[in-house]
Image (cartoon, rainbow, N blue to C red):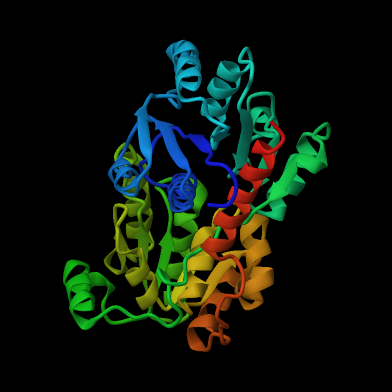
Amino acid sequence: MSGPRLTVIQLVPALESGGAERSTLEIARALIAEGHRSIVVSAGGRLVAQLVEEGSEHVELPIGRKSLRTLGLIRHLRRLFVELRPDIVHARSRLPAWIGWLALRPLRPRPHFVTTMHGLNSPGRYSAIMTRGERVICVSNSVRDYALHHYPGTDPARLVVIPRGVDPAEFPFGYQPDDGWRAAFFDQFPQLRGAPLLTLPGRGTRLKGHADAIRLLADLGERGVAARLLLLGAREAGREAYIAELEALAASLGVADRLAITPPRSDVRDVLAISALILQLSNPPESFGRTVVEALALCRPVLGYAHGGVGELLSELYPAGRATPGDPARLAEHAAELLRLAPAIAPLASHRLADMQRDTLALYRDLAATS
């Protein structure tokens, strides 16, 4: 362990799925590896078991519940801070950040408050809480630029760019799943057999561009390019109406028999590895685009809209995959080009998980040293 033992509390709405949640576990794992104390406060979820198994503690509080009753948790959280005496409180979402910030205000001495801007949230007073950290971690330069543009009173010195990263051991270059996994996958989704697979990973929200992907599948078919489409992780509880809308669109375009929509899966690496092309079609722009890095780490080509964090990543790592938003004809041409002959992909030399963990823990240590 480098320096004194730290106690770090991370605040997130829940531990179900998503980039912020994955980053929470990754930093928790790094804290434990260096001998620090790691605590996460959330409403719980399927990732809690992994968090605890890896050595962290979990306190169940619904600090992300959008209700006036959530304000009643401020005192509860304040008592928790007094009891646990954290060195760092790290908020990764707006409502938990508000609850955490209000709980910290009267405390003396006060733990250091850190925020991470994981997304390009709608600007305003509610979102401004994410710029109130003593250090504000931005997951890309696009996020840093966004923060300075919409919150010009923010001290640029407090904004620290720490991109998300992937573990090369988890996403090894050139990896392919074994024949058993492949056979089981296509037995489960026989409609995906027989043509190159396009995969769009993402939650069940229209912001992820699922409809654009379905239209792309239809456009490719009209051009005589055979393909299949997997919307990986879109089928979620509470999103039934949206999924029905996507299925209706696919039926109207005549591509329903070439489409699969799945719940979140634990074998994302295997699915990406067998895909001919990974899609990242979020609109509006995303803050980062972790799946871009995961796919490229596996040596799989990516086609994504050239804006926000995804455009930033593609410009740096795979310029051939940059697509103009709002131009479906060109998107189909671009996809056909990549399916025919994708440019070579080099092994990742940046955006590694160890880099993100190292830089975040260094930020914690630097802040704690100022106490």
Q: Position of residue 277 (x, y in %)?
A: 46, 75
Q: Give the number of marks.
A: 0
| Residue 296, position as x, y percentages in the image | 52, 74
Indicate the quadrant containing the C terminus: top left, top right, bottom left or bottom right.
top right
Please identify the quarter of the rendering in which residue 115 is found: top right
187 versus 247 height, above or below? below
Left or right: residue 42 compared with residue 309:
left
Residue 186 seen in this snapshot: yes
Front-most of residues 276 and 211: 276
Residue at 43% of width from left, 35% of height from top?
40
Asked if residue 328 can be seen in this view, the reply is no
Name the residue at 55% across, 66% down: 352
**Residue occupying the point 50% across, 21% down:** 81
Q: Position of residue 362 (x, y in %)?
A: 63, 50
Determine which quarter of the picture holds residue 183: bottom left
On the image, the x and y values in percent for residue 132 come to: 69, 29
Q: Is residue 252 left or right of residue 95?
A: left
Q: Is residue 302 left or right of residue 149?
A: left
- Residue 166 or 354: which is nearer the viewer? 354
As displayed, is residue 181 above or below residue 39? below
* Image position of 14 with respect to 353: above or below: above
Quadrant of residue 269 within the rendered picture: bottom left
Q: What's the residue at 79%, 34% (across, down)?
A: 154
